[in-house]
Image: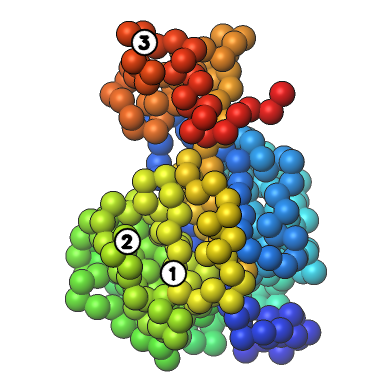
Amino acid sequence: MKTTNTVAKLFSSVSTLAVVVGALAFNSVAWGQVGKVMAWGNTTNATEVPIAAQSGVSAIAGGWYHTIALKDGAVLAWGWNFEGECNIPTEATSGVTAIAGGGFHTIALKGGTVLAWGDNDFGQCNIPASANSGVSAIAGGGYHTIALKVGTVLAWGDNYFGQCNIPASANSGVSAIAGGYQHTIALKNGAVLAWGRNDEGQCTIPASANSGVSAIAGGYTHTIALKGGAVLAWGNNLYGQCDIPDSANSGVTAIAGRVFQTIALKGDKVLLWGENGENITEILEQEPNFGVFAIAGTAQQAIALKFQCLSDLDDSNMVDSGDVSLVLIDLGVCDGSAADLDGSGMVDSGDVSIVLLDYGPCPN
């Protein structure tokens, strides 16, 4: 277990013991959706989204007390920086294709090679030779790092509970990875695999998660899966984070976790349940909860990537019907052609206005 002064940071309160890290899940979109980062919660300035992350962001992730974003191939990070987790190295300022968060470290994927920086007390930022090429996905645990290479799971860093001991079943055919605090999660042929800390049953896979699962995520000591649009969750349920609300039994497209809470994306809205020590659900209700297409979590924040307000998406030098077409295609509203939203008989500025009303006016 960690014995340095970082423990004092982590154990400042029961509600901040740990958080899902590397648990980002999002809707894929045909033409590369970008948007603005929204964050709900408090502490460490992680909810104070910098200007650079208010447009053009394509992916988000969370560590314990820091938020990570990907914009034009460059990593952005803000929040707690006591371990240098928000100090972006030069190699992560271009060409990055994926991001993930560990407890106090940040992970990026560039050209099939894993990059990591920040807290390295357990060697979680020491990239093994096996992760220097051919990696296709990354994730983070509390103090360990996870990678996926040609269907095989790699893991390094803290191994107190065996979270870095890869079982034979995860040596081939794995399609997705995720990290809990001290457990590792993988998806293979629609079945969930999990190993490491299991004192709350987070690695005891229920029969319902043995087939048909399409996405996975981790919380502190609970595990989350998505099956046929319905959320599954098991493990620690002290705050009801594994009690699935009716709203999350269908139509969900993405999942994430934070401490003792579960996050889901349904349509373009965020769903949250479980522990609410930081009043995240109430804060969320005060924000415009629509237009979201990606979700993630930190110790005390729910993070979302929200559709950016309509702009000159087709480079025609004006906001016009071409931009509406791109918006509607991206949102899956139509099958390749813009819709006559205002019933005028044509796709025109009236349709643009409706989109703007739905997603907020663009800044001047």
Q: Position of residue 15 (x, y in %)?
A: 60, 81
Q: Is residue 29 left or right of residue 231?
A: right
Q: Where is residue 90 in the image (x, y as percent from the top left)?
A: 76, 46
Q: Nearer the viewer, mark 2 or mark 3?
A: 3
Asked whether residue 172 appears in the rendered view, the answer is: no
Question: For the residue labelled by badge 3, is the local secondary structure a helix, a strand or a loop?
Answer: loop
Residue 212 can be seen, yes or no: yes
Is the residue marked by circle 1 packed among few (<14), some (14-19), or many (20+) residues within 10 Å?
Answer: many
The type of residue carrying mark 3 is Ser
Q: Tell me how far mark 1 sits from mark 2, CA to CA.
A: 10 Å
The kind of secondary structure element at disc 1 is strand
User: Which label is found at residue 344?
Assistant: 3
Which mark is drawn over residue 248? 2
- Relative to 219, is 333 on the left or the right? left
State how far apart marks 2 and 3 are (Cα): 37 Å
> Which residue is at the front of the view, 352 or 46?
352
